[in-house]
Amino acid sequence: MTDPKVVVEAIGLTKVYGDGEKVYALNDVSFRVQAAEFVAVMGPSGSGKSTLLNMIGALDKPSAGKVIIDGHDLGSLHDLDRFRAKTVGFVFQMHNLIPTLTAIENVEVPMHGQGISERERHQRAQELLTMVGLQGRGHHLPSQLSGGQRQKVAIARALANSPAIILADEPTGNLDSVSGDEVLSVFETLHSQHGTTIMIVTHDANVARRTHRILMMRDGKIVQEDIVGDTFTEDLKVLARSELGQAVLHGQTPDTLSPAERDLIQQLLKRVMA
Ligand SMILES: Nc1ncnc2c1ncn2[C@@H]1O[C@H](COP(=O)(O)OP(=O)(O)OP(=O)(O)O)[C@@H](O)[C@H]1O
Ligand SMILES: [Mg+2]
């Protein structure tokens, strides 16, 4: 099997602030994110989460180390603005929508200057709004949308140029739990149905638990890495090796299961045994 595509590679990433007393916002951080991964970054305030995201998204330059995104070394690119617009989609805590533009027009903004016709821009923006569950809201101004809906527009806008990765910095931080949940569901759908690669900074352990990997930061370093749902996978593997699991995997339908249940369990077991 070939290696899954690496979308982000950070090598020895370091960011130092200050002339006198230096602050190591990032201190020799290395990690990779592969295509179609959904990764959470957690850690206390000031641990370097936003700095890390900003370096990956080429919003800021590292003091040392390098970032390779989608095969491009950011340090050797000349037109970072152009690269960023095409390759990275940002979603921030504050949606940053333009208040005088409708939802559709906001989503179209990043498509300007990309050689896309007006009709195509409009159509794609509409498709993206549907994808995030906002069909029928395209002509609303941000002020006519709820906080959660605005954040969904911001996600649609981030997707406008089919970026290699979505970087989201506390996208649910300003929302009540119900709206936050809905916004997170949008990320989950993007990931599961469209294979979107997502990196999300969050303070909320419940948000992080819905991703697949958690990078824990402290004092500018990644101090821990957890694979989410590992125990669930292990439990399924135990089931797959059991008599029942083996029967299902071999296409038999034990008396206690309906054919539909058998199919569902078979699918799950095949996935963990793949
Ligand atoms: N422009 C800057 N100038 C000086 N110091 C900075 C600057 N930006 C960040 N820092 C410092 O770098 C460290 C990391 O900041 P960062 O914003 O990345 O933290 P964070 O983990 O995102 O925190 P929070 O959870 O509060 O958003 C902090 O100590 C911060 O004070
Ligand atoms: Mg931050």
Image (spheres, rainbow, N blue to C red):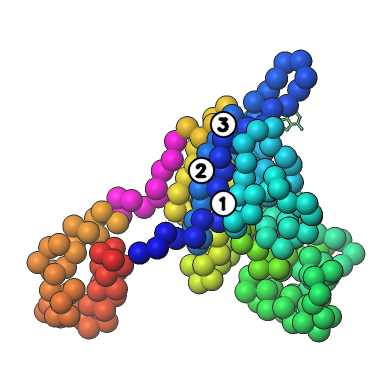
Quick one: SS at disc 1? strand
Residue 206: percent from left, percent from top: 49, 48
Q: Amino acid at mark 1?
A: Val
Binning the other alpha carbons within 10 Å of mark 2 as few (below 14), some (14 to 19) or many (20 upward) gives few
- Residue that badge 3 annotates: 28
Which mark sits nearer the N-terminus, 3 or 1?
Answer: 1
Question: Does residue 262 sit above or below 45 in this rendering?
Answer: below
Q: Which label number is shown at residue 8? A: 1
* Horizontal arrangement in the rendering, residue 151 relative to residue 226 (left or right): right
Highlighted magenta segment, given as a residue range: 224-232
- Please identify the residue farthest to the front as the structure is shown: 76
Binning the other alpha carbons within 10 Å of mark 3 as few (below 14), some (14 to 19) or many (20 upward) gives some
Q: Quadrant of the C terminus?
A: bottom left
Residue 192: percent from left, percent from top: 48, 67
- Residue that badge 2 annotates: 31
Residue in the picture at 51% in, 56% down: 6
Quick one: SS at disc 3? strand
Magenta stretch: residue 82 in it? Answer: no
Quick one: SS at disc 2? strand
